[in-house]
Image (tube, rainbow, N blue to C red):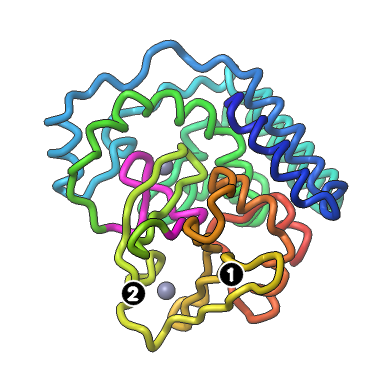
Amino acid sequence: MIHLRDAWRDILARRWALAPSLAPYGELLARWAAYAPPAQGLSWSAERCRETWGRGVPLAAEARPPLDAAHLEDLLGDAMEAVAALDPARAPALQRLAGAWDAGALGPQALLPRREGIGDGSIEAASRLDAAAVAFLAYATLRPVLEAWLAPTRPHFADAHWGRGVCPFCGAPPGFVDVIEGGHRRLACHFCGGAWSFAKLRCPLCGVEGTTDLQRLQAEGEDAGYVIAGCRACHAYVKELDRRERWNGGPPLLEDWGSPHLDVVARREGLLKPLPALLDLAAR
Ligand SMILES: [Zn+2]
Ligand SMILES: [Zn+2]
């Protein structure tokens, strides 16, 4: 998590004009860096991981992540404070969430990505918080623990077969896209830091194929290399960075956080981001 803090400093230097509005992310990264994950990583063998991927199942759907409510409380609390500071209108819902968490009616399992989306709906039901805020709170709370827990399985993915649009490690939808050598697309996961390659002309969110439904908005000038990759079929988008053009770019999560002005453009086009960043929650 230390590497994210250092990389964030570089992004802030590049995005100095946006630095004041990006400040809450620095606080979040400081909390992540201070978090001590459980010592035990997922110890599945390469064979077991590949067999699971071969069935199209993300690892976290079958191996239970070590989530402890007391251990994660500070991470969730800080993320909730960041949301409340950005939009006080969400404060009553956040208070209901805190109450349900303290009473043990909700736990960290409710934040995990699932086949139907982020979480199991119990947070929305208990707090009446909107799904976008829940999705942000979910990865802002789980990222440090999932990244550390899944680390031992990363090498096993090297030549695994995976054609799905969700993260093979934790099952979350993609948060950002890197375009790498040969023009290949690599999707990045905000929940666990995983990455996986994906077809160029297919929407990772709804699976529609071909160029007809692609809506690509290319940034220009000092943002050359950034693209809003949208889909006319499902109206979702993810931001994309061409790493061949932008070799000094930061980690995908931070590139997503560091370019809120591109999200404004995407929203104006009527597109929605499957995994909102904190600043995306300001617009609704
Ligand atoms: Zn993941
Ligand atoms: Zn789509």
Residue at point 66% right, 50% down? Answer: 257
Neighbor class of circle 1 (other Cα within 10 Å; few <14, some 14-19, many 20+) is: some
Residue at far top of view = 39
Q: Quadrant of residue 210?
A: bottom left
- Confirm whether residue 88 shows in the render: yes
The alpha-carbon separation of the residues under discs 2 and 1 comes to 19 Å
Marks 2 and 1, the one that precedes in the sequence: 2
Residue nearer the viewer, 256 or 206: 256
CB of mark 2 within 8 Å of CB of mark 1? Answer: no
Q: Identify which amino acid the numbered label 1 is placed on.
A: Leu
Which region shows up in magenta?
164-179
* Ligand 2: image quarter: bottom left
Residue at point 51% right, 55% down? Answer: 176
Q: Quadrant of the C terminus?
A: bottom right
User: Could you tell me residue 30's position as x and y percent?
Assistant: 71, 26
Q: Secondary structure at mark 1?
A: loop
- Magenta span main SS: loop
Q: Quadrant of the N terminus?
A: top right
Neighbor class of circle 2 (other Cα within 10 Å; few <14, some 14-19, many 20+) is: some
Is residue 110 shown above or below 14? above
User: Could you tell me residue 56's position as x and y percent?
Assistant: 21, 50
Q: Secondary structure at mark 2?
A: loop
User: Could you tell me residue 20's position as x and y percent?
Assistant: 87, 47
The residue that label 2 is drawn on is 201
Residue at point 81% right, 45% down? Answer: 91
The residue that label 1 is drawn on is 272
Q: Quadrant of residue 209?
A: bottom left
User: Could you tell me residue 181's position as x and y percent?
Assistant: 36, 57
Residue at point 65% right, 27% down? Answer: 75
